[in-house]
Image (cartoon, grey):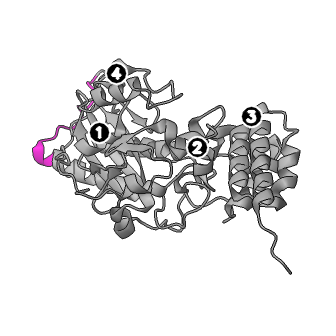
C-alpha cells in the first residue's frame, strides 16, 4: 500500500503572484469580461450610506435589500474564508439604439451568463494553482455592494447617476465578483471622480428620481416602477413613464462618458436583442404583450431578465405605454385587457382607455 505523502501544492513568491494575477485577468478577458480587477475583502466603506438610503425609504418595496446587513458591512462574511475578490465587468451594448426595453434586459439573463463565466474562471484558477480553491461567484445574488468592490478593485468611480463609471467604457456594463481564498496581486482603488460639474443625468431624469448627485429615490425611478414595483404604478408618475416599457437608460444615454466610450455588442453577445423584441417600437411591443398568454410568454421570454416583472407586470407596463401614446387604434387591445384575470392589468388598462378618450375629446376637428 502506497502511503507516501501527497505532493505539496506549489508555492508562489511575489513575482509568481503578480504573474498569476495577470494571467487570471487575461483569462477573464478571454471569457468575455471587459474589465477585471482584484481587491482584498474587509469592511465596506459605503455600507453606512446604503443603510441610511434604505432607512429614508428610497428603496421602496424592495424589502430584500436590507437582508444580510451584518454580512454586507464586511465582504469577508458572505463567504467564510474568502480573502480576495476578483471583480469583473461585462458590457451589454451601450451603442445599441434606445427603445422601450432597457438595453440590459434585451438578451439573456446576465445573472446566468456571468455566474457561469465566473465559475469557469474559478476552475481555471484551481487548475493554475494545482489545488482546490474555496470560492463563490456573486452577481446580484448576495449581501454584497458590488459597486464598492469594483471601485476598490480600480474599475471606476461612482457617477452622479449612481452607476459605476469607467473612463474607457462608460457605464453600460454589468458587475460581478468571484470571492476566493487565494493570494493575488491587489489593484489600486479608483480614487478620483471625473463627473466634474456635469449634471446631465440629473437634468434628464424624466421623473426627477435623482434627488441629488449620487442619490437616487428608487420609488420615482422608471426602472423601479416598471420592474420592481409589484403593485400599481402611482398615477401621477404614469405620464412620465412615456413609452418606456421595461427599465430606463436615460441617465446613462446623456452621460458624456457613454456618448464617447460606450461599447458596441460583439456579434456573439448573449445580450443581443431576442427575437420576441425584434426591434419593435413601444406601441407594437405593448400590444403584443397585452395579448400574450402565459404559455406564449414562457416560450418567448425563456432565460430573459424580463421575466422578473412577470407577465402581469409587463401587461401593466404595456397599458401605461399605450395610455401615454394616446392612439385610438389601441382601444381594442386595451378594452380586451379589461377582462384580464389580473386586477392590476384591468386597472391600468382602464386608466389608459380614459387617457385615449380624453385625447379624442380634446382633439380639434379640422375643416375639410
- Disc 3 from disc 1: Cα separation: 38 Å
* Label 2 or label 4, whichever comes before in sequence order: 4
Circle 1 residue? 149
User: Mark 3, mark 2: which one is toward the viewer?
Assistant: 2
Q: Does residue 318 appear to the left or right of 145 in the view shown?
A: right
C-alpha separation, residue under disc 4 versus residue under disc 1: 14 Å
Percent position (x, y) of residue 33? 39, 55
**Marks 3/4: CA–CA distance:** 36 Å
- What label does residue 344 carry, if any? 3
Q: Which residue is tagged 4? A: 71
- Magenta-tinted stretch: 4-16
Give whichever of discs 3 and 4 has the lower sequence position.
4
Q: Residue at x 17, y 37 (%)?
A: 11
Label 4 near label 2: C-beta < 8 Å?
Answer: no
Q: Position of residue 139 (x, y in %)?
A: 44, 39
* Tag 1 secondary structure: helix
Task: Report crowding for label 4: few under 14, some 14 to 19, many 20 or more residues within 10 A (C-alpha).
Answer: some
Amino acid at each position: 500500500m502506497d502511503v507516501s505523502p501527497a505532493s505539496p501544492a506549489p508555492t508562489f513568491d511575489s513575482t509568481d503572484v503578480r504573474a498569476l494575477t495577470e494571467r487570471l485577468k487575461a483569462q477573464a478577458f478571454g471569457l468575455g469580461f471587459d474589465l477585471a480587477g482584484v481587491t482584498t475583502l474587509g469592511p465596506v466603506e459605503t455600507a453606512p450610506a446604503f443603510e441610511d438610503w434604505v432607512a429614508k425609504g428610497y428603496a421602496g418595496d424592495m424589502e430584500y435589500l436590507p437582508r444580510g446587513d451584518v454580512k454586507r458591512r464586511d465582504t469577508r462574511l458572505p463567504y467564510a474564508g474568502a480573502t480576495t475578490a476578483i471583480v469583473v465587468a461585462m458590457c451589454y451594448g451601450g451603442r445599441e439604439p434606445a427603445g422601450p426595453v432597457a438595453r440590459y434586459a434585451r438578451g439573456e439573463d446576465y445573472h446566468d451568463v456571468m455566474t457561469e463565466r465566473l465559475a469557469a474562471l474559478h476552475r481555471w484558477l484551481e487548475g493554475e494553482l494545482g489545488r482546490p480553491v474555496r470560492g463563490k461567484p456573486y452577481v446580484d445574488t448576495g449581501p454584497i455592494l458590488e459597486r464598492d468592490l469594483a471601485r476598490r478593485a480600480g474599475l471606476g468611480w461612482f457617477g452622479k447617476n449612481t452607476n459605476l463609471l469607467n473612463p474607457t467604457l462608460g457605464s453600460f456594463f454589468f458587475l460581478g465578483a468571484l470571492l476566493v481564498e487565494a493570494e493575488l496581486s491587489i489593484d489600486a482603488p479608483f480614487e478620483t471622480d471625473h463627473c466634474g460639474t456635469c449634471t446631465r443625468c440629473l437634468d434628464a431624469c424624466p421623473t426627477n428620481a435623482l434627488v441629488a448627485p449620487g442619490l437616487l429615490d428608487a420609488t420615482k425611478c422608471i426602472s423601479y416602477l416598471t420592474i420592481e414595483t409589484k403593485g400599481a404604478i402611482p398615477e401621477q408618475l404614469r405620464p412620465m413613464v412615456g413609452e418606456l416599457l421595461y427599465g430606463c437608460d436615460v441617465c446613462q444615454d446623456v452621460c458624456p462618458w457613454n456618448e464617447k466610450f460606450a461599447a458596441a455588442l460583439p456579434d456573439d453577445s448573449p445580450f443581443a436583442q431576442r427575437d420576441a423584441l425584434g426591434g419593435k417600437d413601444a406601441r407594437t411591443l405593448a400590444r403584443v404583450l397585452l395579448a400574450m398568454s402565459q404559455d406564449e410568454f414562457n416560450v418567448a421570454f425563456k432565460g430573459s431578465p424580463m421575466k422578473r416583472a412577470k407577465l402581469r407586470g409587463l401587461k401593466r407596463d404595456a397599458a401605461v405605454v399605450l395610455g401615454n401614446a394616446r392612439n385610438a387604434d389601441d382601444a381594442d387591445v386595451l378594452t380586451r385587457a379589461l377582462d384580464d384575470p389580473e386586477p392590476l392589468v384591468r386597472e391600468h388598462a382602464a386608466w389608459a382607455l380614459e387617457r385615449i378618450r380624453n385625447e379624442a375629446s380634446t382633439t380639434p376637428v379640422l375643416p375639410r
